[in-house]
Each structure stands twice: as structure tokens, then as C-alpha cells.
Image (tube, rainbow, N blue to C red):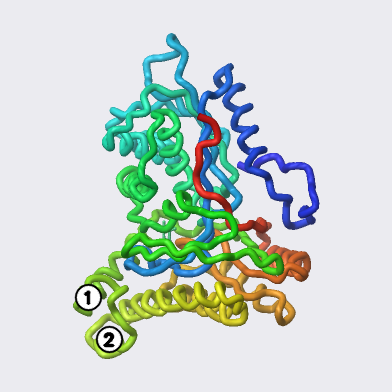
Amino acid sequence: MTFPSTPSTDHASAVIPAPVPLASLVNRAQVGFEDRFGRSPRWIAAAPGRVNVIGEHTDYNDGFVLPMAIQRYVVIAADRPQPTSRPMPIRLSSSAFEQAEWISLDHTSHKQLAPWARYVLGVLVGCRDAGMEAGALDMLVDSNVPLGGGLSSSAALEVATATLVEAVTGRSMPPVDKALLCQQAEHRFAGVPCGIMDQFSSVFGRPDHLMLLDCRTAEITPVPLNDPQVQVLIINTNVKHELTGGEYAERRDQCERVAKALGVHSLRDATLDLLVDRSAALQPVLVRRARHVIGEIERTRQAAQAIAAGDWGRTGQLMDASHASLRDDYEVSCRELDLLVELAGQQPPGAVIGSRMTGGGFGGCTVSLVRSEHLEAVAHAIHDGYRNQTGIEPSLFTTRPAAGAHIVRG
Ligand code: GLA
């Protein structure tokens, strides 16, 4: 669903809506809880979505990623149920999905639940197994992370749930364990064999910083992104072509097969020279997949250095090369994403620093770094060009790197 827009402020324009402060979303969740359950919530937790600036499909290859948390959050308000309310322990309501679910940790067939509720259940079960049982709860989920847009709305929901459990139990878990628990919930309860990027971004997000995450060691190196002349522009194609999610698992499997054939633990340990050497013995499709991953890991390292040095020319080249590689070698882009990137490339010299698809692919969003003084013109040109050529209305917004998950009340 779309949310009612907030009254315009200084940033508002025809195609870029004004940012909604987290405090407004928290307020909306609180009111939603009161409407639904007839009293004030006792606990409130928030966790952001993320955008990945570069390093795509590298996390499950032990590589590097360079994401940031965005100023879009999942907020969960909760309280203990009133004594007589019902037999089931958890009453879950979502204004974001306009649905309610009753869940029990003994749910043996979580497949009967709406997909979004499975993430919540998965995290609650994971917390219980880790000795942090939340107990009976009334919960209200609100969100302004676009759904299915490749901005990790599911990871934000998982991490918000784990953070809520911390508030409810009065105990905190080590942040790395929390992110891994959420990743496991996605593997087990949503059947998506994702890497660690999304959950780490939502847990560790830091204002004004990207995170260079080494997915082998889980070490994070903060990279400042606070130049007021540079805007992070996210454009949602508003299409989703991946029907079953099987494409992601297939890519992951291909990477594992080619690593094995190259005799390395993961593609992090492979080089382009090694790949070229062995390419005659490999299926061409596997060579292309590995070429993307090996090149992307190196591009991500270089982009972190370029951004830290304010070398925007080099940053843009790396982002553009990343998109081309995802399109041609990894084959996870689509016509709509390519069009947005092409339109970004057609802007006057210097206006757009770089542009690429972000997230898993097959639809969802692009991320572009845009010079502040050109933001309005660029946004309009890409919006109009995309709408004219596809007949689809894209959604645009800008964001600064945001704070990670936290307890708002509790
Ligand atoms: C999805 C997954 C992440 C990562 C990206 C691609 O968002 O959840 O772990 O693999 O795709 O970079």
C-alpha cells in the first residue's frame, strides 16, 4: 500500500517527496496500535531498510559490500495482551500490509501465514531458541520501506522484531549475533538463502556513513558519506520480475560450483587470472558469473577508497561498471533497471556521478549519486523519461545514511 504523504517541507518537489522523519512514523505506529488494541503500546522498536551503493551478489561469496541504512524504517509497537483477550500468544497486526495474523511459536506450518508474518515468527522462534522468549504480545507493524523494492523491507522487519524482543526481555544480544539470527530466520522461514548484507546494514547503520563490510570476517569499516554536494537518489522501477525467488538461489549455486571447480573455498579467493586460466574447462555461463563476482569484489574495495578520498569521478566509473557487469555477466538486471541507468547516463556531464541497480535485481530500485545542484533537474528528467518509455510511474526519494535499529520506547 502507499502511505498518506506528509505535508511538504523544504525538500519537497513534484517528483521527490519530503522525507518522513522517524518520529512521525513512530507516532503513526503508536496511533495504529491504539486504534487496533485500544491502549498505548509499552514498547516500540525501529529498524531501517538499506541501499547498497556497490558490491552486489558478493556477500554470499565472502566478498565486500558497501551499503548504508536508509531513512525508511519498520516500526513495531507492542504490549502484553490483556488477560482475557484470546488463546493465541501473539496477535500481530500490520498497517503496512493491512492484515492481521495470530501466531504461535508452536506454529508447525508457517506456510499458512502471510509471507510478512513468517519473518516475524522466524525471528521470535530464533530468539526463543537463543534463550530470549518474548512471551505473549500484541504487536502492530508499520513501515515506510518500499515493499519488494530491493531495499530490504524484510530484513528491516526481522531486525525490528529482534530489537523489540530485546526491549521486551530487557536483554540485549551481541549485534553480530542479532544480525545472524535474523538472516537465519529468512533462510528457514522465508526460504531465501540470502547473504548477510541486509541484516548487518539494518543493525549497524550509522548516520553519515557507508559500511564497508567484509562478509568473510563480518568486520565493518565505516566510510564517511557526508558531502552536502552529493545526494543519494533512489528510484524504484515499481516492477518485480522475479516470480519464485529461484533465480537468487540459482546464482548462489552457480557461484559455489565455479568456486569448487577452481579449487578455492569461495570466489573471494579466486582471481581473474585463475578464471581465465581455467575458463576452457568451465561452462561459459559459469565464467560470466565468476567474472562478475571477482570484478565486483575488487570494485567495491576501490569504491570505498574513492569515496573516502572524495574521488567522485572514479566512484562513478565503478558504479557504472558494476551495473554493466550485473546486466551482462550476472544477468540479474531487467529492461526497466537498465532504462533508469541509461537515463541517468544521459544527464548533462557532471550531474550524475554514477548509477546502478541495487539489491538482488529483476526489478526494484536503482541507486544514483547526484550532484546536489542538479538533483531537481535530474530527478524530473529520469522520472519523465522512464514514464514516457514504459508507461509506469517510478517512485523517487533521496536519503542520507541513517542510524541502525534501536529501541524507541522500552
Ligand atoms: C539480496 C540478499 C543479499 C544480497 C543481495 C545482492 O538483497 O538478501 O544478501 O545477496 O541480494 O547483493
Question: Is the CB of mark 1 within 8 Å of ligand 1?
Answer: no
Q: Are marks 1 and 2 in contact (CB under 8 Å)?
A: yes
Residue 137, label in figure: none
- Residue 339 visible, this angle: yes
The amino acid sitting under disc 1 is Val
Residue 264, label in figure: 1
Q: Secondary structure at mark 2?
A: helix
The amino acid sitting under disc 2 is Leu
Sequence-first tag of 1 and 2: 1
- Residue 362 visible, this angle: no
Q: Secondary structure at mark 1?
A: loop
Residue 274, label in figure: 2
Residue 153: % across, % down: 50, 48
Q: Between residues 27 and 238, which one lies in front from this camera angle?
A: 27
Q: Between residues 264 and 335, which one lies in front from this camera angle?
A: 264
Name the residue: 33% across, 60% down: 249
Does 139 sit left or right of 398 as displayed?
left
Residue 234: % across, % down: 62, 61
Question: Is the CB of mark 2 within 8 Å of ligand 1?
Answer: no
Name the residue: 41% across, 39% down: 162
Residue 84: % across, % down: 43, 9
Name the residue: 36% across, 69% down: 63
